[in-house]
Image (spheres, grey):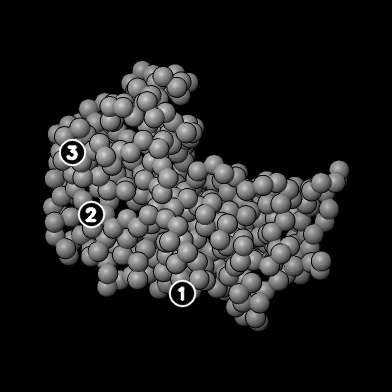
Amino acid sequence: MPDPLVVVVGAGPVGLTCAALLGRAGVPVRVLEAEPVRSRELRASTWHPPTLDLLDGLGFAAPLVAAGLVTPTWQVRLHPSGERAVFDLGVLAGDTAHPYRLQCEQQVYCELVEAALPPGVVVRDATVTGLSQDDSGVTLAVLGAGAAPVPLRAAWVIGADGGRSAVRAAVGLELDGSTYPETTILATTDFPFEQHLAGLSNVNYCWTDAGTFSLLRLPRCWRVSLYPDDGESVEAALAPAAVAAKLDRIAPGAAAAGALEVRPYRIHRRLVADYRRGRVLLAGDAAHLNSPSGGMGMNGGLHDAFSLCAELVAVIGGADPALLDRYTRRRRPVAAEEILAQADQNRARMQERDPARRRQALADLQAIAADPGRAREYLLRSSMLTGLRRAATIA
C-alpha cells in the first residue's frame, strides 16, 4: 500500500471523523490505532445539537440518532425531594436541526464511521513510538507485530490519540493545567431508575445532603457518577458493598440489580499552547482535557476535527500552509473560554455543599428555564452552539 498523504494517529471518534472528512475530500489517509481491537468500555455518550448538525453532512447523524436515546430535556435536581430545574432544548428549534441531546455510546459511532471507510484505512496494533519532520513531510516510527518499528512517511500527521498522546509528546507540546482533587466513580447498571424517581430526564445532575451524583441514561443501561463519602478512601468507595450502598441511597433496590461495570477516573483541566507544530496537528483530548460534566469533551474534539480538516484540505489543495494556524486561533479560545470554563462552572455548581447556596442556585436555574429567551441563551452556550459560532468568526 502506498504511503498516505495524511496519517491520523488514534481511531477514536475524533480520529475516525478526520479520516472520514479527508476521505470525502479525496485525500489519501491512514489511521493508526495502538489497540488491537476496539475497546468496549463505556466512554463518552452525550451528543450535542451542533455536533449532530455537523455529522449530518457525513451521513452519520441519522443512524446515530436511530441507535440512541433522543433527550429533549435535561435537569438539575435536589434528591430525594425531586425539586428540579428542567431545561427544554426545544427552544433551540430555530438554531439547529437537532434541538435535543442524544445519548448513545461513542463506540456505536466509531463502528458506523469505520464501516464507511475503505478497507485498510484503519490499521490496528500499530503504536507510534516517535516521529521526525522536515520541510516536505513527517516520518513516523510505527511498532506493529514485528520486533522493530517500521518507518511510515506522510505529508501531514494528526494526533488524535487522547490525553496520553504519543504524538503530542513526540513534538514536545505539553498539556498545561491541573488535575482536580476528587475521584469520580462511574458505575453502570441496568436498574430502571426512571421507574423509581419521578420526573427524571435522560440526563440528570443531582444534589444530595451527602454530596452529588449524576444519572445518564443510555439505550440499555444507566451510567451513575458517584463520589467517595466524606472520610472514605477511593479504594474503600470502589468496594462492591460501598458501590451498592451508594446506589441504594439513590433508589432503594438499585443495589440488588448490581453494577455492570465500576471504574474510577480523575478529572483534568488541561490545554496545549498550540494545536500545531509544523506538519503535526493535534485534536480532541490530545489538545485539551476537561471535566466531563456537561458532555463537552468528545463534542469539542469532533468540532476540532471539522475545523482542522477544512483547513488541511484547503492547504493540500494549494492554499498557504499558514492557513493551518487559523485552526489554533479558532479552536483554542473555544476550548479555554467555552469548553473548559463551562465544565468548570458545571463542576463547581454540583460540588457546592452549602444547602442555602444550592437552593439559590436551583432557584436561579429554574428562573432561567422558565423564561424562553433566557433559556435559549443559556442553552446556546451549554449546547456548544455559541462556541462553534464564535470560532467561525475568527479570521
Q: Residue at x 86, y 43 (%)?
A: 147
Q: Residue at x 79, y 52 (%)?
A: 141
Residue 223 located left or right of residue 358: right
Q: Residues within 10 Å of mark 1 (few under 14, many from 20)?
A: few
Q: Measured along the vertical axis of the image, is residue 7 above or below residue 254?
A: below
Circle nearer the viewer, 3 or 2: 3
Q: Residue at x 36, y 18 (%)?
A: 231
Residue 82, label in figure: 3
Q: Quadrant of residue 318?
A: bottom right
Amino acid type at circle 3 is Gly
Q: Measured along the vertical axis of the image, is residue 105 above or below residue 228?
A: below
Measured from the top left, where is residue 18 in percent x and y? 59, 64
Toward the viewer: 287 or 148? 148
Q: Residues within 10 Å of mark 2 (few under 14, many from 20)?
A: many
Residue 335 in sight: no
Q: Secondary structure at mark 2?
A: strand
As measured in the structure, the alpha-carbon distance from the residue carrying label 3 to the one carrying label 1 is 47 Å
Amino acid type at circle 1 is Ala
- Sequence order check, earlier mark of 3 and 1: 3
Q: Residue at x 62, y 55 (%)?
A: 11
Residue 291 located left or right of residue 354: right
Residue 301 located left or right of residue 252: right
Toward the viewer: 297 or 135? 297
Residue 395, label in figure: 1
- Residue that numbered label 2 is attached to: 87
As measured in the structure, the alpha-carbon distance from the residue carrying label 1 to the one carrying label 2 is 34 Å
